[in-house]
Amino acid sequence: MTASSETTAKPLAPGQSGPKVETIAVRRDEDGLRLDRWFRVHFPEVGQGYLQKLLRSGQVRVDSKRAQANDRLKSGAQIRVPAIVRSPKKSVPSLRAPPGVSKGDRDFIEAMILYEDEQVLVLNKPFGIAVQGGTGTKRHLDGILAGMADRFGDRPRLVHRLDRDTTGVLLVAKTRDAAAKLGRTFQTRSAAKTYWALVKGTPHPTQGRIEAALVKAAGPDGDRVRKSREGEQDIAMHATTHYSVIDRVGHRASWVSLKPVTGRQHQLRAHMALIGHPIVGDNKYEGDKNMPAENIEVALHLHARRLVIPHPATKEKIDVTAPLPEHMLRTWETLGLDPNRFGRDDE
């Protein structure tokens, strides 16, 4: 790791332990990078959950102040890193891939590539695979990509995330500089994201905007989010989604286009459930009950369809579209929907 520390190594006296904390300066090329992504670059073995614990307990700080995982860093900022990060507990899920990624995993990644140049990689994420590691998750895209540094010339870095069962466009940076620049692009909301989903019923009006602040809430089947309540302003996350009905199947279901302005966890899933039209197959937000037709697979029908973003180096537009996954194509056929009905400019 190429980072400066405020301490100078000195010989230790007998029985003396090493420093319990170090302070690392944010480099110029890391300006604007999120704190959790900074940790992913410098300490890839530290999982998101473990980092959250360190932040809540104040063991990790920025410029001597408490911080949050999604805080944006400024060049020269001083990050307090406890020594335990250098050798995290064995129970902490590792994001580092085991030595030697299998040929099957390499072929798996290669088959996903929608776009690639020297700095940017865009993948078509399939259904059912996690983007990052977590408790009980050993195989994930971040880990496989980390094991393919020989193929990409560096350790590829995720720019954003998709849920395990969400499919479609996933942006990856092939260099640290590209990761920082693309991260700032997402921060300034200069990236245009379009999702396709099948929802229960038909939203009224057929075009609209959903603005509902969200807070995290644990559930029996894992984490989820809900609408914030009075008195929760300090923990509420502002969230805005634009939606538009593309086609519908009577009163049973609708094919909708979703354009998130913000990028909160489960934002689209929670927002559609809040207006009474959960995404079909969503087992966290009541979308898996009373399916709109027989023979429809009980799987999340949410797809990151399109991403338009300026290139981190040339500033020219990258415009990538991902085809619908197999389970959604089967549903479209069952319901008589035509996935080729509109051109890209109509989405």
Image: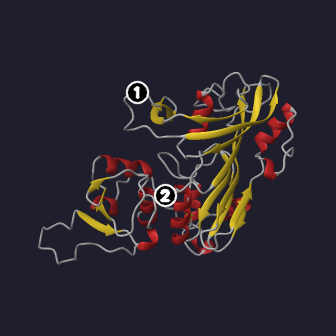
Residue 192: % across, % down: 65, 53
Question: In the image shown, does 84 or 157 lie closer to the viewer?
Answer: 157
Question: In the image shown, does 307 or 303 lie closer to the viewer?
Answer: 307
Examine the rendered structure and indicate whether residue 310 appears above or below residue 47. Answer: below
Say few, some or many: other residues with alpha carbon within 10 Å of mark 2 (under 14 / 14 to 19 / 20 or more).
many
Q: Residue at x 59, y 61 (%)?
A: 144
Q: Is residue 72 left or right of residue 189?
A: left
Examine the rendered structure and indicate whether residue 198 appears above or below residue 142. Answer: above
Whether label 1 touches label 2, CB < 8 Å: no
Q: How many marks?
A: 2
Q: Is residue 236 left or right of residue 274?
A: left
* Nearer-N-terminus badge (1/2): 2
Residue 244: % across, % down: 72, 37
Q: Does residue 44 appear anywhere in the picture?
A: no
**Which of the numbered marks, if any, corresponds to residue 95?**
2
Q: Residue at x 45, y 32 (%)?
A: 218
Q: What residue does disc 1 label?
A: 230
Q: Does residue 75 appear anywhere in the picture?
A: yes
Residue 185: % across, % down: 56, 60
Q: Is residue 254 left or right of residue 162?
A: right
* Secondary structure category for the residue under label 1: loop
* Amino acid, disc 2: Leu
Asked where in the image residue 73 lies, by quadrant, the reply is bottom left
Residue 63: % across, % down: 28, 61
* Amino acid, disc 1: Glu
